[in-house]
Image (spheres, rainbow, N blue to C red):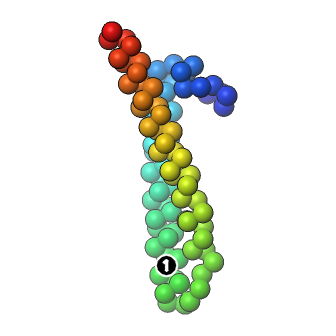
């Protein structure tokens, strides 16, 4: 999949494949960030300040951007389905 291609230029198969891979990777990232946030919070409570606490907070916008991308893909797939059924 080219970077510069818009969603409307991709085939339905490419959109479904992209949606699946983004969903899986986003879930893994969210799980890792949650785990890191929990561990660094625990370390912060036990030992005091921990600079690693900033990492999950700084990387959390990636999860939000990925969910937005998944939503755009779902919207494109739905519009294609409606157009096909018309």
Q: In the current view of this chain or complex, which residue is farthest to the bottom?
A: 47
Residue 58 image-quadrant placement: bottom right
Instruction: Give SS at disc 1.
Output: helix
Q: Residue at x 51, y 69 (%)?
A: 36
Q: Give x and y (percent) for residue 86.
A: 33, 9
Q: Residue at x 46, y 65 (%)?
A: 34
Q: Quadrant of the N terminus?
A: top right
Q: How many marks?
A: 1
Q: Give x and y (percent) for residue 37.
A: 50, 70
Residue 49 image-quadrant placement: bottom right
Q: Is residue 65 above or below residue 40?
A: above
Q: Is residue 10 visible?
A: yes
Q: Residue at x 51, y 25 (%)?
A: 14
The residue singled out by tag 1 in the image is: 41
Tell which of 66 and 19 is nearer to you. Answer: 66
Q: Is residue 21 visible?
A: no
Q: In the current view of this chain or complex, which residue is farthest to the top?
A: 86
Structural crowding at the residue carrying mark 1, measured as other residues with C-alpha within 10 Å and reported as few (<14), some (14–19) or many (≥20)? some
Q: Residue at x 60, y 71 (%)?
A: 54
Residue 5 image-quadrant placement: top right
Q: In the current view of this chain or complex, which residue is farthest to the left?
A: 85
Q: Give x and y (percent) for residue 19.
A: 46, 35
Q: Give x and y (percent) for residue 46.
A: 49, 89
């Amino acid at each position: 999949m080219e970077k510069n291609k818009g969603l409307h230029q991709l085939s339905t198969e490419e959109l479904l494949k992209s949606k699946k891979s983004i969903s899986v990777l986003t879930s893994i990232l969210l799980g890792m960030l949650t785990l890191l946030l929990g561990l660094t919070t625990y370390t912060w409570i036990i030992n005091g300040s921990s600079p690693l606490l900033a990492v999950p907070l700084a990387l959390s916008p990636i999860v939000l951007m990925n969910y937005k991308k998944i939503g755009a893909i779902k919207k494109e797939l739905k519009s294609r389905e409606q157009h096909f059924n018309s």
